[in-house]
Amino acid sequence: MSDQSFEDAYALIKQIKKHGFQAYLVGGCVRDYLLKKDINDIDITTSAFPEDIKTIFKKVIPVGIEHGTVIVRYNQVSYEVTTFRNLLNNDHKDDTVNLIADLSKRDFTINAMAMDESGKIVDMFNGKTDIANQIIKTVNSPYERLMEDPLRIIRALRFSSQLNFDIDRATLKMMSELKSEINHLSVERVTIEIEKFFSGTYLKKGLKYLQATEIYKELPIFKENYHFIEHLSENIQPFNRFSEIISYFHLINGTITVNHWINTWKLSNTIKNESNNLIRALKDYEINGLNTLLLYHLDINLIDSFVKVVDMYYKVKLIAEDLLSQKQLLVISSRKELNINGNDIIKLFPHLNKGKWINEIIEDVEKAVLYKQLKNNNYKIKEWIKCNRQEIN
Ligand code: ATP
Ligand code: MG
């Protein structure tokens, strides 16, 4: 998120205040501001209700009205604006009391600060000190806060992986004790946090905590494959997408199919397609090394992922830029660019019934063109097919 977004957020706050309400930046954006890190998204907490916000701004999207949350769109950026948490259930008039109550319901001290448009920070739970000491600590009693929402157990791990912070001793002990509560959470919520955990710059630190607390014993798939986490390679690196996680662990245990990963972790079709594409390339690499067909089939957006998993698993350092330029030099970049199609082939063999053979011929042509044994020319390809018909059949 850009500095402009921060300036815009201040403008939003001023606008809300003009209408007689209180409003603050809150949570992760205040933490990341203090850490001088890139901000992921900006949350605003306010004494205004969603109906009030709707009258103040033009573009308001209701996303969780029952939780008091709306999205305000401003200069093409989304800001999540939420009413002070306790204001929804009681009508306490004192905004300061309401702000403190809101902050006290947040997960960790580092996430429980609010900041106004002048940069003044409200810090009731020593969040600043914990940031300075690089500590993740629950707001108030670890037992109560982790029981209240066990997702916080996983969030603590992901913040240690993203920020290189230590987990406070009492918080860590309770995370370990209460880890089985994770099983009551919806998988979708866990997936979001685990994806962030695995992509953390300081993943190795997070993994040490994951190992020490044995929290992996409560996570889908990992709970049946302890060795995934117990015997992790020293070579492990942050995974930028879930498909990298799936591909890496698929190399370790191929009996767990991509479909199983997708269904168990409730992942998208995009992740499924990415995983299948990556695994195809990795398996080809294992047998044949880097080759033309592999580069042809490997999605251009997955080159970095491929290089990373090859490094982690096969301990071979490929260079993504080299792969990219080799891929760009290929005669064709997709089947669409082949100067022949299914209909042309059917016409060549009018007596044959349609079937798998058509695709098989196209694959052979594709390969011959890619390896420059055949020109990508409609006439030449047809001649080549007729010539090679015996072999093709
Ligand atoms: P990110 O940088 O990934 O956005 P974040 O800390 O902003 O990290 P969000 O999930 O965006 O995390 O949540 C915003 C804020 O809402 C948090 O900083 C925290 O104050 C509060 N929060 C989020 N999830 C929880 C939770 N499960 N329990 C308590 N407070 C939470
Ligand atoms: Mg956030």
Image: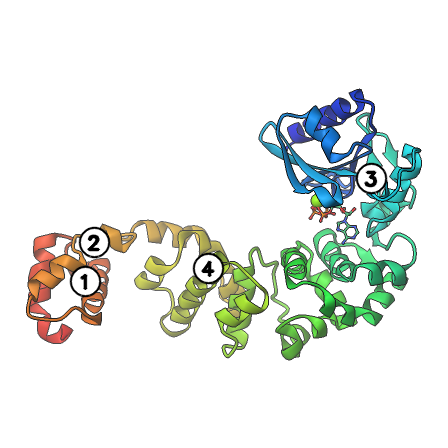
Residue 85: which quarter of the image? top right
**View extreme (top): residue:** 18
User: If you read the primary sequence from the N terminus, does the residue marked by circle 4 or circle 2 appear first?
Assistant: 4
* Residue at left offset 73%, top offset 45%: 66
Q: Is mark 2 in CB contact (under 8 Å) with mark 1?
A: yes
Residue bearing mark 3: 84
User: If you read the primary sequence from the N terminus, does the residue marked by circle 1 or circle 4 appear first?
Assistant: 4
Asked if the beta carbon under badge 2 is closer than 8 A to the nearest atom of ligand 1, the reply is no
Q: CA distance from mark 1 to mark 4?
A: 25 Å
Instruction: Check the picture and name the quadrant holding the N terminus.
Output: top right
Residue bearing mark 4: 274
Residue 331 makes an appearance in the image: no
Question: Which amino acid lies under the numbered mark 2 shown in the image of this protein?
Answer: Leu
* Label of residue 365 in the image: 1
Residue bearing mark 2: 338
Q: Nearer the viewer, mark 1 or mark 4?
A: 4
Q: CA distance from mark 2 to mark 3?
A: 60 Å
Question: Percent from the top left, x then y, of residue 127?
Answer: 87, 45
